[in-house]
Amino acid sequence: MGKFLTFLGRYFIMMKRVLTKPDKWYIFRRRVSFELEALGLNSIGIAAIISIFMGAVVALQMAINLESPFIPKMLIGYATREIMILEFSSTVVALILAGKVGSNIASEIGTMRITEQIDALEIMGINSASYLILPKIIATVLFFPFLAIMSTIIGCFGGYFIAWATGIINPEDYVDGLMFGFKSFSIIYSLIKIAVFAFLITSISGMYGYYANGNSLEVGRASTKAVVVSSVAILVFDLILTQLILI
């Protein structure tokens, strides 16, 4: 309990420093643009590869297990779409990005801490927490929802591809299922979740990197803790947001 309270105290103290008005807007905009590429664009590949295979696997498993003649085959497409929108494209993609993006942020800021670059920023009168972490938060909160939409589309296409390639389900039935009972609010729900998850991943990872001390081994430990704590936070807030939004 003591460690948890220490974590919360450090987190809120740091966020008070992070969420402040930037000193120089043109520098801030340049850093946000850089982070959009470093944390956002560079994550498209892994999100796309995992999404297409996950969509294919979900559709294949549904087709194998729904063998009853009383169950319409179109439900395979419907179930694939709902799984991709409601959980995979937001929660699972966020867990994957917690490992890729979170460890990157924690190790980058942690290295700056142990090499005294952050101390140099402070000596120059720069709010180092805001300068280093706020652009990353803005970039991920803006870009991760795009990744969620892309993941949903690619995952549904992966299901269509496996239906066409194996013949286990008529592709037309699969497409009918994709369009059946669509609710636009599901997309909004998914985007809200991944935006919250993006904030959690970036802020928690930034905190662990910012408070790293010692040598390179400590940076590695900080990166590991950042991924673990971010993943747990994602699962907890997934439950909370589902309760608040859908129920």
Image: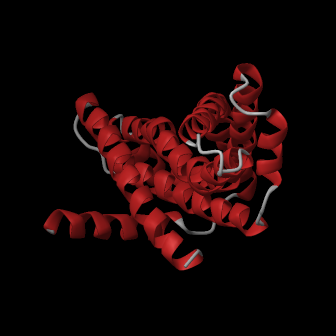
Q: Nearer the viewer, residue 168 or 214?
A: 168
Q: Please say if 91 is above or below 183.
A: above
Left or right, 103 with respect to 214, comes to right
Single out the residue that lies furthest toward the top: 165
Near-viewer residue (37 or 132): 37
Q: How is the image coloured?
A: secondary structure
Q: Does residue 1 lie above or below 206 as drawn? A: below
Residue extending farthest to the left is 2
Quarter of image, res 21:
bottom right
Q: Quadrant of the N terminus?
A: bottom left
Image location (x, y in percent) of residue 17? 47, 66
Q: Residue sitting at 68 percent across and 53 percent down? A: 145
Q: Is residue 27 above or below residue 215?
A: below
Instruction: Residue at 71% x, 49% y: name it.
Output: 72
* 150 and 121: which is toward the camera: 150
Q: Between residues 164 and 100, which one lies in front from this camera angle?
A: 164
> Residue 207: x, y in percent?
39, 54
Residue 177 on image: x %, y %: 77, 50
Name the residue located 63 percent from the left edge and 37 percent from the top edge: 59
Observer able to see residue 247: yes
